Amino acid sequence: MALGRVLVEAFHGDVVEWLRERVELVVVDPWVEPERWDREASRVDAIISRKGRIGRDHIERSRERLKIIARTGVGVDPSRVDLEAARQYKIWVTNMPGSNAVSVAELVFGQMIALARHTHEANRAVKENRWSDYLKYAGTELAGKTLGIIGMGNIGARVAVRALAFEMSFLVYDPYIPESHVTAVRGRWVGLDELLVQADIVTIHCPLNQETKAMIAARELALMKPCAYLINAARGGIIDEQALLQVLQEKRIAGAALDVIESEPPRQDHPLFNLDNVIWTPHLGAVTTEASTRGEWGAAQEVIRVLQGKRPKNPVIELP
């Protein structure tokens, strides 16, 4: 007998097969079928979400049927799950700490190199038979540069370790960790303003919440070097997009790599799309075979635990 009805996104076949042996499964891609996702989210006992949103409307329409919302990744913010509504209706919310840390850290370094060496523009030049333009794409080395890391959790720590391998020094802004955690890996713990002033590359790895919403706005961007790059593979709402647009248009910073944006997917006429000093990826930080497998299996196991009446291993909110 099935333990319950579970809504999932398009996951790996072995995870889906394992779940089908235990529950009644509903598979929906929220980007392809958003209306069906909205409809099914209130008709199930559990939801496993990679990117699909679960809001108060889904929770209230569930009429207390929903027991758990299991995230395959780390971030559990208002753009993904309404935590207050989940707490009010006593619904477990879980995540998978560390599941995507390596994948995000590696993407960040890929984007650092792409920005510093202008590989996207150079690729286009070769395809357009402009091989002789190569000197236009003279870049800079990462070695000897200063990396500013905002947020020193699982992902930020892995970025720091990789920075040392690239012969970079690094600064860390994270008011929730002791200075000794940073100095132990040969970094320097600083305030946000000092980090922005000194860093050649700034990369963001903190959660989106009331404290970090628009944390990087016009005043903060004005502190950065004209030759500096900004990378965001965390959450779009951390950066004030209008302020970022202005400094990029005016070339007051050298460029940016954005894996996230405040409203995903972005509208087709988003003004940042018109800039040649921005590299985009569609929230790919955790999209590797290894990270997806870790996250999907972990979330699936959390759902089965809760449907069997057990406590989950990684609750984001505490329930009585």
Image: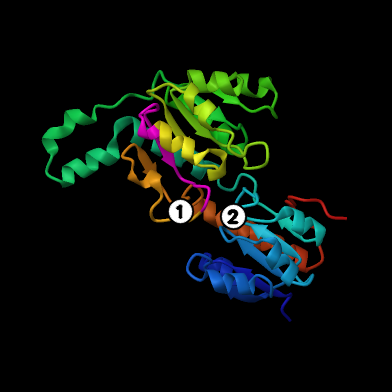
User: Sequence-wise, which precedes: disc 2 or disc 1?
Assistant: 1
What amino acid is labelled 1 in the image? Pro
> Is residue 284 positioned above or below 219 on the image?
below
Q: Residue at x 76, y 68 (%)?
A: 307
Front in this rendered view, residue 193 or 251: 251
Q: Secondary structure at mark 1?
A: loop
Image coordinates of residue 43 in percent, x first then y, are 69, 75
Residue drawn at x 70%, y 54% is 94
Q: Is residue 260 magenta?
A: yes
| Rendering quarter of residue 310 | bottom right
Vertical side of 183 occupied by 238: above or below: below
Query: How many numbered marks, from 0 up?
Result: 2
Q: Which residues are magenta?
A: 248-263
Q: Is residue 181 left or right of residue 36?
A: right
Secondary structure predominantly adopted by residues drawn in magenta = loop
**Image location of residue 247, percent across then percent down:** 42, 31
Of residues 37 and 268, the one nearer the viewer is: 268
Q: Which residue is mark 2?
A: 295
Residue 260 visible, this angle: yes
Q: Residue most toward the bottom? A: 1
Judged left or right of residue 63, residue 297 is: left
Q: Which secondary structure lies at badge 2?
A: helix
User: Is 182 covered by the magenta stretch?
Assistant: no
Q: Looking at this view, is 4 or 176 the one in front? A: 176
**Which is nearer the eye, 227 or 171?**
227
Q: Type of residue at label 2?
A: Gly
Residue 306 at x, y = what percent? 77, 64
Q: Which residue is mark 1?
A: 266
Quarter of the image where the N terminus is located = bottom right
